[in-house]
Image (cartoon, rainbow, N blue to C red):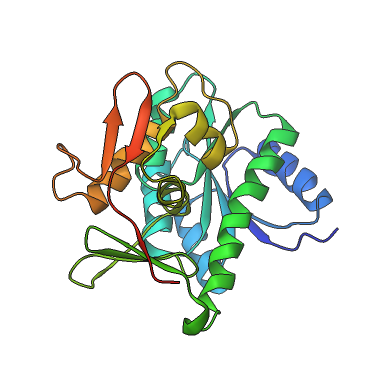
């Protein structure tokens, strides 16, 4: 197989660990497993993973805390594992920086699709970071500067603001379709490659996270407008420097 990415599985259930290892190694990935936060950090320091699959229900550690630690410390894609009925867990997981989620019990084809989708974004970011400055595509809006290739966002004062892969994908989609009303269904399909279902707050959570980073007052947004009953619209004027 052409795949060679390193995936770290943080999961305490030995059966689930084995099932994930066997399936994903069969798809060509290199798999490392652990069941606690101390081992997770030791493994990441020794052999950083490209993507982590994080079980939120660990007996000796808080999966939410570990997810946040991964996001804050490492440049890694993160997919959280949640129970089918744990909508709140999915929302909180996305709020603290996970790139996507898969529900237990999972469909193997869906899990693989989620992994490939997140890995594409991770690889795009790594590849863009190696590009020369002269090749970079840059856009500005409301004083903000976004490098579309390196995925680097700077505020009006020139300070770098970190974006998760999901936040960047959402911002990029808004910029590409600035001035158009985008439905939740459209955004969910574009960002997560899944169909929108009633009570699915994934996109609303992602919009809220992005607003906190780019809006002067996220409670009264001027850049990412809510279109009641429909979705969202990027209202800021875009200037391209490429």
- Give the vertical position of 238 relative to 195 (above or below): below
Quarter placement of the N terminus = bottom right
At 43% from the left edge and 23% from the top edge, which residue is drawn? 87
Locate residue 5 relative to residue 70 in the image: left or right. Answer: right
Q: Position of residue 129 (x, y in %)?
A: 51, 75
- Front-most of 139 and 72? 139
At 57% from the left edge and 26% from the top edge, which residue is drawn? 195
Res. 49 visible in picture: no
Which quadrant of the view contains residue 164? Answer: bottom left
Res. 176 visible in picture: yes
Quarter placement of the C terminus = bottom left
Q: Position of residue 137 (x, y in %)?
A: 47, 70
Locate residue 125 relative to residue 227 in the image: left or right. Answer: right
- Front-most of 56 and 175? 175
- Front-most of 226 and 116? 226
Q: Position of residue 162 (x, y in %)?
A: 34, 62
- Give the vertical position of 83 relative to 33 (above or below): above
Locate residue 37 relative to residue 28 in the image: left or right. Answer: left
Q: Position of residue 174 (x, y in %)?
A: 41, 46
At 41% from the left edge and 49% from the top edge, which residue is drawn? 167
Which quadrant of the view contains residue 158? Answer: bottom left
Residue most extreme to the top: 198
At 36% from the left edge and 41% from the top edge, which residue is drawn? 179
Q: How many badges with numbers are in the image? A: 0
- Front-most of 177 and 122? 177
């Amino acid at each position: 197989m052409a795949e060679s990415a390193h995936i770290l599985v943080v999961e305490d259930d030995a059966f689930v660990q084995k099932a994930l290892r066997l399936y994903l190694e069969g798809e060509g990935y290199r798999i490392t497993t652990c069941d606690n936060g101390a081992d997770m950090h030791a493994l990441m320091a020794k052999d950083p993973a490209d993507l982590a699959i994080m079980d939120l229900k660990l007996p000796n550690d808080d999966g939410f805390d570990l997810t946040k630690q991964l996001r804050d410390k490492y440049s890694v894609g993160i997919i959280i594992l949640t129970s089918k009925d744990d909508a709140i867990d999915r929302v909180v997981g996305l709020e603290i920086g996970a790139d996507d989620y898969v529900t237990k019990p999972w469909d193997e084809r869906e899990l693989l699709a989620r992994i490939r989708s997140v890995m594409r974004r991770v690889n795009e970011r790594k590849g863009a970071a190696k590009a020369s400055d002269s090749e970079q595509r840059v856009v500005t809006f409301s004083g903000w500067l976004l490098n579309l290739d390196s995925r680097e966002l700077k505020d009006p004062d020139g300070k770098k603001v970190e974006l998760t892969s999901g936040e960047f994908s959402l911002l990029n989609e808004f910029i590409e379709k600035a001035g158009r009303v985008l439905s939740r269904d459209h955004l969910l399909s574009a960002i997560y490659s899944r169909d929108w279902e009633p009570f699915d707050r994934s996109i609303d959570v992602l919009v809220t996270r992005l607003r906190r980073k780019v809006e002067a007052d996220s409670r009264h947004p001027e850049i990412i407008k809510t279109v009641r009953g429909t979705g969202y619209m990027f209202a800021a004027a875009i200037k391209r420097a490429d």
